[in-house]
Image: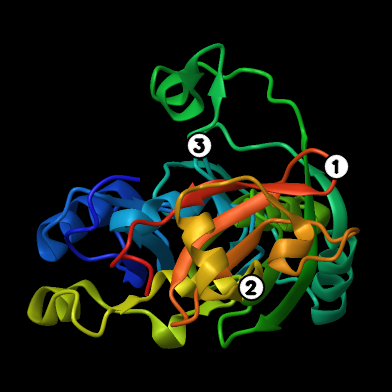
């Protein structure tokens, strides 16, 4: 990793609606005064909520955050389908659909829980034949998309005052499209549906309660907004080492598991922290009983 100057850490942002995830990254580069900002997983422009950013040296930690489970709060409108499966799209079908019964909606949601094969929407960033699906969709081209395995741990639905509008809480694996779930729910009830609102309330252990609005970041900058790089220990195992071992880790040496106090049958990766509690490196399994660095954090950047 390069220079240790500038802010370093993990920033949880509350993405506003109508912003792309790239827009948020670009804005935060200006606010935080560094080009080294990236995100751990895209949110659709319509969606709001938790977007986890890596800043400075912590951009290289994002790879360990990309596969985390997500939690969403969604609003689903029955009776109408759109080409994007959400409110940003154009209406494609209007169904003569009676307000669904609570028991029927709950039962249909239950069938969309567990391990599923989900077909990605055409309006998405997935590449097919070297082109992103949303680019093809804008050109009026629809292509076959291979189903992808996803897991929906929880799909709870609740009526609103409008009988055709329901809210839902979805807890799911990375890569799950909630708008596809909404569309599939509508079809399961004999009609159609689309998302009218979506808010991500959690990415793994990073929650909306600790998220910062862009206005607040603009006012206060990085001060108080960045979690230290050691926040990665929320999702990978922590390994504390003494001063002598810390020097070897800082030089990126391949080490025996015993040196780091790692069980022989334990799976990595491991966040290695020094005597002062700062993050020194992330190590991963190597040959036999040895481990090697996946990345080494420069001095002064691992708090």
Is 202 rendered above or below residue 47? Answer: below
Residue 117, image quadrant: top right
CA neighbours of label 1 inside 10 A, class few (<14), some (14 to 19), many (20+): few
Q: Which residue is mark 2?
A: 238
- Of badges 3 and 2, nearer the viewer stands 2
Give the residue furthest to the top. 129
The dot on residue 124 is 3
Front-most of 149 and 190? Answer: 149
Residue 155 vs residue 19: left or right? Answer: right
Front-most of 221 and 300? Answer: 300
CA neighbours of label 3 inside 10 A, class few (<14), some (14 to 19), many (20+): some
- Dot 1 or dot 3: first in sequence order is 3
Residue 178 vs residue 148: left or right? Answer: left
Q: Name the image quarter holding the C terminus.
A: bottom left
Tell me residue 110's x, y (percent): 87, 68
The local secondary structure at tag 2 comes to strand
Q: Which residue is mark 1?
A: 288
Measured Cα–Cα span from mark 3 to mark 2: 36 Å
């Amino acid at each position: 990793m390069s220079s240790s100057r500038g802010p370093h850490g993990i920033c949880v942002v509350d993405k506003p609606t109508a912003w792309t995830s790239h827009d948020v990254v670009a804005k935060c580069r200006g606010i935080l005064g560094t080009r080294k900002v990236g995100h751990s997983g895209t949110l659709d422009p319509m969606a709001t909520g938790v977007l986890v950013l890596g800043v400075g040296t912590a951009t290289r930690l994002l790879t360990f955050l990309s596969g985390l489970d997500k939690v969403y709060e969604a609003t689903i409108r029955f009776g109408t389908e759109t080409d994007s499966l959400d409110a940003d799209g154009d209406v494609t079908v209007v169904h003569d659909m009676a307000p669904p019964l609570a028991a029927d909606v709950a039962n249909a949601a239950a069938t969309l829980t567990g391990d599923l094969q989900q077909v990605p929407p055409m309006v998405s960033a997935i590449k097919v034949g070297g082109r992103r699906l949303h680019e093809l969709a804008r050109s009026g081209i629809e292509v076959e998309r291979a189903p992808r395995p996803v897991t929906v741990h929880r799909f709870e639905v609740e009526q609103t005052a409008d009988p055709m509008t329901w809210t839902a809480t979805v807890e799911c694996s990375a890569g799950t499209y909630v708008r596809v779930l909404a569309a599939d729910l509508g079809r399961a009830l004999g009609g159609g549906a689309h998302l009218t609102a979506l808010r991500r309330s959690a990415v793994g252990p990073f929650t909306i309660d600790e998220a910062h609005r862009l206005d607040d970041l603009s006012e206060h900058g990085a001060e108080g907004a960045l979690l230290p790089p050691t926040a990665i220990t929320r999702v990978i195992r922590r390994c504390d080492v003494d001063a002598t071992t810390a020097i070897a880790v800082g030089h990126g040496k391949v080490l025996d598991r015993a040196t780091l106090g790692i069980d022989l049958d334990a799976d990595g990766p491991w966040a290695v922290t020094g005597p002062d509690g700062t993050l020194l490196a992330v190590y991963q399994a190597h040959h036999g009983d040895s481990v090697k660095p996946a990345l080494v954090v420069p001095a002064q950047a691992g708090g």
